[in-house]
Image (cartoon, rainbow, N blue to C red):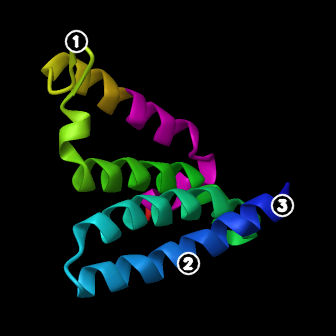
Amino acid sequence: MNRLFQLCLLISGLALVVLLLGMARHAAALWQPAAVVAAVGLALGIKVVPPLRSYQYTAWIVVAVVAGMVYPTAFRQWGGIDLRNKWLILVVVQLVMFGMGIQMRIRDFTGLAT
């Protein structure tokens, strides 16, 4: 299984090179998918790097932001659901904050007392 995640890191690095080349050539059809692939590969691959393992949740948030910025029309409406609905956005933000909260430990709060 670790081999698969190492491969994801390699693919992420290659996608980053394609991303940079695509941006240099102003080829949106090249750099846009490369940006998403690089972000997804990194989010999957950091699992094999022990110091970065705890940042997986954050990496998936970055993937969502990258995908939303690169392909905004894909995230405006899915089927009959308007993804710009203020109540839906409120629920999603609350779920993200809950997910961040359950990733924290008591020692994360020790610096607040000083």
Mark 2, residue position: 13
User: Which residue is depicted at the point 31% across and 63% down?
Assistant: 32
Residue placed most toward the observer, 25 or 76: 25
Q: Which residues are magenta?
A: 95-113
Q: Tell me the tag on residue 80.
A: 1
Q: Nearer the viewer, mark 1 or mark 3?
A: 1
Q: Is residue 37 above or below residue 21?
A: above
Q: Secondary structure at mark 1?
A: loop
Front residue of 88/8: it is 8
- Residue of label 3: 2
Query: Looking at the picture, which amino acid does disc 1 mark?
Result: Gly
Q: Nearer the viewer, residue 21 or 44?
A: 21
Q: CA distance from mark 3 to mark 2?
A: 17 Å
- Horizontal placement of 64 versus 44: left or right? left
Amino acid of disc 2: Gly
Q: Amino acid at mark 3?
A: Asn
> Between tags 3 and 2, which lies in front?
2
Rendering coords of residue 18 (x, y %): 43, 78
Give the spatial CA distance, label 2 vs label 1.
Answer: 37 Å
Left or right of 52? Residue 5 is right
State the CA–CA distance, disc 1 to disc 3: 39 Å
Figure quadrant of the N terminus: bottom right
Q: Where is residue 21 shown, x and y percent of the image?
A: 35, 85
Residue drawn at point x = 15 percent, y = 27 percent? 84
